[in-house]
Image (cartoon, rainbow, N blue to C red):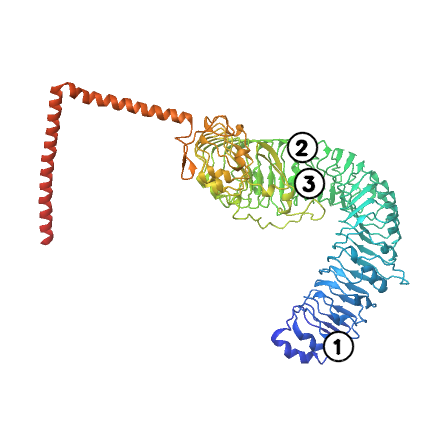
Amino acid sequence: MTHFLAIETGCNLSGNNLASVSSWFGNFKKLEYLDLSWCGLHGPILNAFQNATSIKSLDLSGNNFDSLPSWFHKFEELKHLFLSSNNFQGTIPVALQNMTSIETLDLSNNFFTFVQSWFIELRKLVSLNLSSNKITSMEYSISSILKNMCHLKRLYIAGNRLRKESIGNNDLSTCIRHDLENLDLKKNEFNDHLPSWLVQLENLGNLYLQDNFFFGPIPSSFGKLLKLKNLDISNNKLEGNLPNSLGQLVNLQIIKLSNNSFNGTIPQSFGQLINLDAFDISNNYLTGTIPSSLGQLINLTSLDFSNNYLKGIIPTSLNQLTNLNRLDLSRNKLDGRIWIDFQKLVTLSYLDLSSNNLDGTITVEESRPLVISEMQYLDLSHNQISGSLPEHIGHIMPNLECLILGNNLINGSIPKSLCQVDDLSILDLSKNRLSGKIPNCWKDNIAWEEINLSSNKLSGDFPSSFGNLSSLSWLHLNNNSLHGEFLASLRNLPFLMIMDLGENQLSGTIPTWSANTFSSLQILRLPQNRLSGSIPSQICELSSIKILDLSRNNLNGSIPQCIGNLRGMTLEVPILPPTLPPTSVFTEGPGWSSGAVSNWQTEDVIEVTKGRELDYIRILKHVVIMDLSKNNLVGSIPKGITLLYGLHSLNLSNNHLIGKIPNMIGDMRSLESFDVSSNQLSGTIPSSMSVLTSLSRLNLSYNNFSGPIPTDNQFLTYDASSYANNPYLCGFPLPNECGYSPQVHGRNEFEGDNSKLDKLEKWLFYFVIAIGYATGFWGVIGTLWFKRTWRHAYFRWVEDLADTIYVTTAIRMAKLKKWMIMMRNRVDV
């Protein structure tokens, strides 16, 4: 006799084959275990099991049911019912109301919004899962459920929309004892103090309250939950001091108190939590020093105290945590010397001590090259670390994936041993005092994401081996003293998004990169170098470019007419990141994750915008800038540049440009800064610029613009410096006024070029014409009037000329007529 029936996952029993199997299922009257999960079922297929009243376990999860049949209560022996991941909506099905035999009920991942009062009568429930629904209210509170279900061991109501009124404050003492071991209320909207009734759950082992709006302090009575193993109350609004009583929870294995507003010091009593595996109190307002008693937590594998206000030295007792593989003390006020004993912390793979006031040097013993072979992530940036890097650092840390030492006082050269680290993904040595040449030994691997060596004193040629790093996404070498011709061999970096080589001494011309060279490049910075030659038209093929800075070089020639093809500077085509190669980088921990897309939050470039030097970091991927200033560019401004609708800043100043500002500039609605100062531009200011209401900085100074300054919108906010040294301009805010004529076609038409100087030139022109006319007239007519012989000779010459013209015309007409008759006769023949 069959007692168990499981249909293969992904089956299809709906539709046309339903009738053929219904009668077959009806034969299983003694069926006890039925698994129809993930079969895509819906409709009346359950009627096929109406007589199978012996079923004890029924799994219908992962289907399309939205209701239960009215006869469902006939399953009187049903103990385990799984209805997760269906389409149930509204209230709990009434068919479950009298099924008091149920011990396990899973209603998760549906669309329930309300829990009725009869639900608390299911007193035999051992496991209840209502997670991931849309429940906003309950007719009875959670404390009422626990008061009536004394034998409930697992209660999951995570991922709903419950608030304060659903918590309840009932006394749970009606139960002789409470069997509840797991309580999961995370990801709701609870906005109250932590429930006082929690301390009555003497068998509670796992408590998850994270991602809510709980406020107030942690009650000291929490120290009574002696069986608690996992406590997670992170991401709330809790405050106050951490109670000493938490040190009594000696069975705790994981405690997460991060992202709250706790203050005060870390209690020494936490050193009693000898079974603790993970300890996270990051992102709070804790002060004081790190307790030395934490060195007793010998089972600790992860310790995160980052982003607090801790001070003092790192206690040497932490060297006793020989099982530690993750240590994050970043973004505090710790001081003293960095002394981490890598010879003892042999399992440490993640170490972040960044953004403190630590000093000292990085020293490791070459005699024991494998003592820190587990190290994958090392971040000591934003400290006061000095000295040089160990030459053999790459051999001692062969599995290193991220080395971040930026913003320190490190000197010396870059160790060549870093070239030998196979899985190195991120190398950041920026803003130090490194000198010498960059090693030219870098080898390709599928993990490379970033190289940042900016703001040092590095010199020598650009390393050609950088061209081998095919997976590289970010390259920052700016603000050094690199020289030599700009490397044209960078032709195999399809994932490169930022190339910043500005503020160096690079020379030569800009290579003629094709569309396939940097298909993902969004930021190209080459300012303040010694580049010469013209801007190649092939640069227009870099269709993903959003920041193009070629300023402060020796470039000549004209701006490419194809400049409007830079689609990355428009609002029409979104620039999506490329499909990145898989990496093996360490992916856990706040503040760091693999993948070039997520690391946009940490990238930065410095650009001169609106007359100020700005450091763009978090909003970098949304910034659109073109800066070609301080070169020797000639010709006019291409009309196609007005197609760059997404451009925020355009700087063409300090060149030799001529001609007019394109009339279609009004289409560049995103423009916030426009600088064409110190050129030889002329013509009037286009009236279409009045619609650029986002334009907060305008500089047209030192040109030859003429006519009136527009008086609409933002033009009323610019001062006279925006138009300085344009002698033909007039109107506010300049002192010289414009003259106007009566209205023509509904607008005032400016006389001539609308300036007093133009009026004077016009009067001089007419005066000279009049003098010339009078001189010619009286020079000829006056002579004929007073000398009769000249007059007779003149009229005789006129008569002879007329006769000659008449005779010549008559002869030519006769010849033409004769030729036409002859041609007609030939056609007739």
Whole-angstrom CA distance, mark 1 to mark 2, is: 74 Å
Q: Position of residue 110 (x, y in %)?
A: 70, 63
Q: Position of residue 255 (x, y in %)?
A: 81, 50
Q: Nearer the viewer, residue 220 or 755?
A: 755
Residue that badge 1 annotates: 31
- In this view, the mark in front (1 or 3): 1
Give the residue displayed 47% in from the left and 39% down from the top: 688
Residue that badge 2 annotates: 432
Instruction: Name which of mark 3 and mark 2 comes first in the sequence.
Output: 3
Residue 1 appears in the rendering: yes
Instruction: Name which of mark 1 and mark 2 comes first in the sequence.
Output: 1
Residue that badge 3 annotates: 403
Rate crowding at label 1 as few (under 14), some (14 to 19) or many (20 or more) other CA atoms within 10 Å.
many
Task: Give the image quarter of residue 322.
Answer: top right
Task: Give the image quarter of residue 352.
Answer: top right
Q: Nearer the viewer, residue 340 or 814?
A: 814
Rate crowding at label 2 as few (under 14), some (14 to 19) or many (20 or more) other CA atoms within 10 Å.
many
